Image (spheres, rainbow, N blue to C red):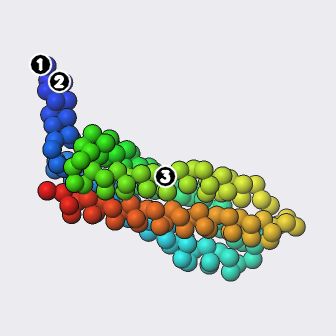
Amino acid sequence: MNSRDLAMDGLGRALFTRGMSRLVQYLTLVAALGCGLSAGVFFAFSSFVMPALDRLAPGQSIRAMNSINKLAVTPVFMTALFGTALACAGLGAWAVTSWGERPAALVLAGCALYVVGAIVVTMAANVPLNDALMNVDPEGADAAARWSSYLSDWTPWNHARAVTAIAASGLLIAALRVSP
């Protein structure tokens, strides 16, 4: 066996042993923290950022939200959001191959909730709404109606992201608690 095969064999044992290996436990902890971090961002938007923006004149709200949307695409935030999804993908694979182990169902449920509730909803609902808002003239005659429509469409999807991300974090923490 060459060194690459030995390393892969060792990685396989570290990931797919009976119960949660230390590596899987650490990855679960990192994913739980990432889910919680994402939930916090989504919660902040739902609880005070969007209501604060809505208190401004519609043109100001549009300009501010467009600025936020441009600035959100940073390596740090994208790593937290999508790095967590990558960790969930790996943990999901572990859960499927370790089905029957006590934490597997909790891990799979938490990972699925995060990927669907945070990532799929973001890409399918929030990002297209953000992109459409970028094309709204803040000084246009229809700015108030467009902002109102954006707010009423975007915010419920964001609530869903917050709820699913915090639930995912809780399920992953629960998986660590039941792990032998």
**How far across and down, in percent of the image, does residue 161 sit?**
51, 62
Q: CA distance from mark 3 to mark 1?
A: 40 Å
Q: Which residue is mark 2?
A: 5
Instruction: List the single residue furthest toward the left.
Output: 1
Rendered residue at 34%/45% (across/down)? 92
Instruction: Please name the amino acid that badge 1 sits on.
Output: Met
Q: CA distance from mark 1 to mark 2?
A: 6 Å
Rendered residue at 44%/69% (across/down)? 40
Q: Which residue is mark 1?
A: 1
Cβ–Cβ below 8 Å for labels 2 and 3? Answer: no
The kind of secondary structure element at disc 2 is: helix
User: Mark 3 against mark 1, which lies toward the viewer?
Assistant: 3
Is 101 located above or below residue 137 in the figure? above
Of label 3 and label 1, which has the lower sequence position?
1
CA neighbours of label 2 inside 10 A, class few (<14), some (14 to 19), many (20+): few
**How far across and down, in percent of the image, does residue 32 sit?**
32, 60
In the picture, the disc for residue 116 is 3
